Image (spheres, rainbow, N blue to C red):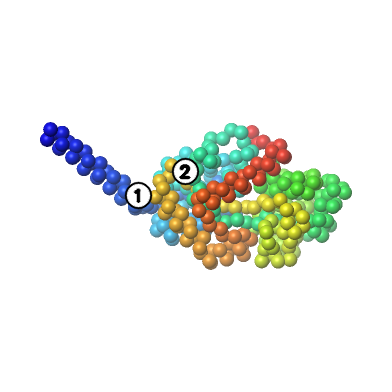
Amino acid sequence: MSLNINILTKKIAIGLSLSLIAFSAQAAYPDRPIRIITPFAPGTGPDTNAREVAAELQKNLGVSVIIENKPGAAGAIGNAAAAQAKPDGYTLLIGSTSSLSIQPHLYNNKTYDIEKDFVPVSLLGVMNTGLIASPTVAVTDVKDLIEKLKKTPGQFNIASMGVGSYSHLAGEWFGFDSKTKPVFIPYSTTSPFSDLMAGQVDFLFDALPAAAGGIKTGKLKLLAITGDERHPSFPEVPTFKEVGLEDFSPFGWQGLLAPAGTPPEALKVLGEAMRKVNDNKELADRWEKTYIGKLVGSTPEEFKSFITEDSGKWQKVIKQADIKLD
């Protein structure tokens, strides 16, 4: 009997020791470098944003935070890599409109499930989308454009970054809401901005960071932006709601996610670190001036609801446009 008690005592002691070790390991998170997978090419706007976030997280967490670029297949390559990573808090994902709200609806065959394979940590930022025009185009405003497109279909064209891209689908959305049929000119490997400035293409729907400089110097025209109110960088430019397109609301956004199964303790630490990022006034001011957007934090629950709502809007557009890429 005493032998059994001794064995039981030893088992309890070992169990307590293992629990303490596990607790200590969890309490020490993070104790080594963190990798953030970004499904964007190096040097692009979203990549720059991700690196700014990584630098801030590095300050807040006290460990190196490394960006790993995995572009391709509309974000599917990076998403798949993050979904298959060990859920220990040391591999994270920067998600975006294109990779999380749009990409899942373009492909039937996927190696991951957005809802099942990831847990949201925090929304990071939201960027206004604008209707950007060539300076030579004979259109004064959005109402004028819609009237001319209805009167003479095909009179103007809209550049896009390729079929199924954010810029293409935003243009399709505009066509549905304005009851017009835009003509799209796809650019797959080059940027359309040079041709837009030169008047070889007429319009482009895009988030504003890449166009802001050209707009301010008169090399491009900005006819309207998404949002509930005018942007302080372009106070003279109306919102789409002001011109009558109440439901036209494409936004560029980015946020931080982790593989499903990541320990709650790690998620809590990451959430607190992200709150500090979003409370950084200097970074918020830079986002507003440089990216024509807002640094926006959230709880995991708020971010999850945000993705669900945004994804639903794009799913409707993709279904109506009848676009599939596989």
Q: Residue 241's x, y, as percent?
A: 73, 56
Residue 136 can be seen in this image: no
What is the CA distance from the residue labelled 1 to the residue labelled 2?
Answer: 17 Å
Q: At numbered mark 1, what does the secondary structure look like: helix, strand or loop?
A: helix
Q: In percent of the image, x 21 and y 43: which residue is there?
A: 13
Where's the C terminus, which quadrant? top right
Q: In percent of the image, x 63 and y 43: which residue is there?
A: 312
| Among the two numbered marks 1 and 2 on one chain, the one whose residue lies closer to the N terminus | 1
- Label 2: how many residues lie within 10 Å, few (<14), some (14-19) or many (20+)? many
Residue 12 can be seen in this image: yes
The residue type indicated by label 2 comes to: Pro
Q: Residue 171's x, y, as percent?
A: 73, 48
Q: Residue 181's x, y, as percent?
A: 79, 44
Give the image quarter of residue 72: top right
Q: Disc 1 designates what residue? A: 26
Where's the N terminus, which quadrant? top left
Report the number of numbered marks: 2
Specify whether 1 is left or right of 13: left
Q: Are marks 1 and 2 in contact (CB under 8 Å)?
A: no
Q: Residue 5's x, y, as percent?
A: 15, 36
Front-most of 29 and 77? 29
Q: Disc 2 designates what residue? A: 259
Label number found at residue 199: none
The residue type indicated by label 1 comes to: Gln
- Label 1: how many residues lie within 10 Å, few (<14), some (14-19) or many (20+)? some
